[in-house]
Amino acid sequence: MHAIGVSQYGPPDNLQSREIPRPSTPTGRQMRIETKAVSVNPIDIKVRGGTYDDPPDYYERVRGLTKGEEPNFHVMGYDGAGVVREVGPDVRHFKVGDEVYYLGNPVLQGSYAEEQLVDERHMGHKPRSLDFVQAAAMPLTYATAYEGLVDRLGIQPGREGRHYHHQRRRRHGRHRVADRTARPEAARRHHDGVAARDRVLLARRRRCHPCRQPSRRHRAADPRAGPARRHALKYAFITSRTEQYLRPIADLLAPFGRMCSIVQARFDMYGTQCMSKSLTFSWCWLATGAYHGYVNDQEEKHREWYEKLASLLDDGTIKCHLTQRKRLTLENIREAHKQTEAGKGIGKTALGVDEPGDHPVFQ
Ligand SMILES: NC(=O)c1ccc[n+]([C@@H]2O[C@H](COP(=O)([O-])OP(=O)(O)OC[C@H]3O[C@@H](n4cnc5c(N)ncnc54)[C@H](OP(=O)(O)O)[C@@H]3O)[C@@H](O)[C@H]2O)c1
């Protein structure tokens, strides 16, 4: 089969198309999936560039993996959507022929391949209202927001304002999370009702309107604007430059507040308000369970979230944030990587095998 990946980590032009053996027979709860679409995320860029450091031993782990299949060829890609072609002996929730969407395990070969092995704990049935390209844009961003806000920060959907997602906040009209964007085009997407990009989210005690341009109150709560005096916050979700935001967030948070970061960084808590306020800091890495051998039921929860997300997409509660769709070719993958790396995109880019064009897919 054809697959797109790297034999040497580096710039986007290092991405190549290769013919490699099809995945082996699925074991345990794995399934063999025929890939119909993939989407591009910042993790794809970091891994391909050779700079991915969320786990310190990441490249050692994947080196072992790629040796067994095709020497030094690491297939890229995490988000995907496709059709189940074979199921492992312990699969409980899916059958051959099911249409699914998923976020693969970062220490297995990735989604930019005609076929891939994916554990059933990392997937859900594809939303009926979305095609494969749209579906492939959803899993990573949704699961990160959910795990960060609900599981790590402890915000209870339904009890404290159902604000785990921008769009759900709009729908239910109870808003406690303020956000800001530096780019007018990103703000416009937000106004259009399409998910704005992840950014620093500050859960507030007061109601605020998430579609409005940053108001004076928002700006007061913006860590870049300095400590806010009147509006103490219970939660902070850091999705960019942890090292830059830790100190101002510690100033802003109320005593016993919580913060969660999804972006690895070096920083020092000493000399901040973290201890005086007894703040809780938590990392959130979506792949923790898979990376450490499925030590708890976290991945089982991911499958449940994807099933729930499908129903929220189908009933219109959440809208797909896909903004660019392309044919799944090497050239288009390279281009999507360059665009994501430059930080110029809004929303998500996804690539599908049935998008128009003559060029053979995965080549
Ligand atoms: N730990 C995990 O499991 C996990 C999961 C998913 C993602 N991540 C990581 O989280 C990060 C964000 O991912 P993403 O998919 O949201 O990336 P993205 O789509 O590229 O979005 C980046 C966001 O950061 C905002 N931003 C850029 N510079 C900023 C600054 N100085 N202060 C505040 N906000 C700033 C941008 O705001 P504008 O729109 O205004 O430009 C944009 O919304 C990446 O590093 C990714 O690798 C981690």
Image: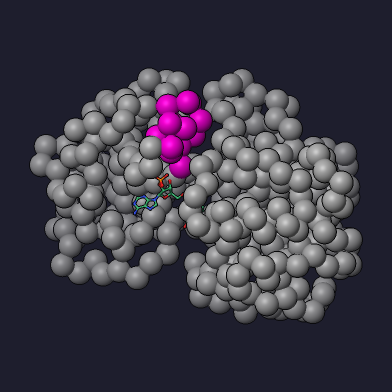
Along the line of sight, which residue is nearer the eye, 221 or 251?
221
x, y percent for residue 163: 40, 32
- Taking the spot 75% from the left edge, 58% from the top edge, the residue there is 330
Along the line of sight, which residue is nearer the eye, 213 or 142?
213
Question: Is 308 on the left or on the right of 274, as rendered?
Answer: right
- Taking the spot 19% from the left edge, 33% from the top edge, the residue there is 216
Question: Is 196 on the left or on the right of 334, as rendered?
Answer: left
Task: Say which quadrant the N terminus sits in.
Answer: bottom right
In the figure, residue 196 lies in which quadrant? top left
Task: Say which quadrant the C terminus sits in.
Answer: bottom right
- Taking the spot 87% from the left edge, 39% from the top edge, the residue there is 97
Along the line of sight, which residue is nearer the eye, 245 or 350?
350
Along the line of sight, which residue is nearer the eye, 237 or 47?
47
> Residue 191 colored magenta?
yes
> Residue 42 colored magenta?
no
Question: Is 44 on the left or on the right of 133, as rendered?
Answer: left
In this orientation, does residue 179 appear?
yes
| In this view, 90 is above or below 49 | above
In this orientation, does residue 143 appear?
no
x, y percent for residue 272: 17, 62
The way the protein has been coloured in the rendering is one colour
Number of callouts: 0
The magenta segment is 185-197
In the figure, residue 75 lies in which quadrant? bottom right
- Taking the spot 58% from the left edge, 43% from the top edge, the residue there is 348
x, y percent for residue 191: 42, 27
| In this view, 42 is above or below 188 | below
x, y percent for residue 76: 69, 62
Q: In this view, which residue lies farthest toward the front? A: 358
Q: In this view, which residue lies farthest toward the left? A: 229
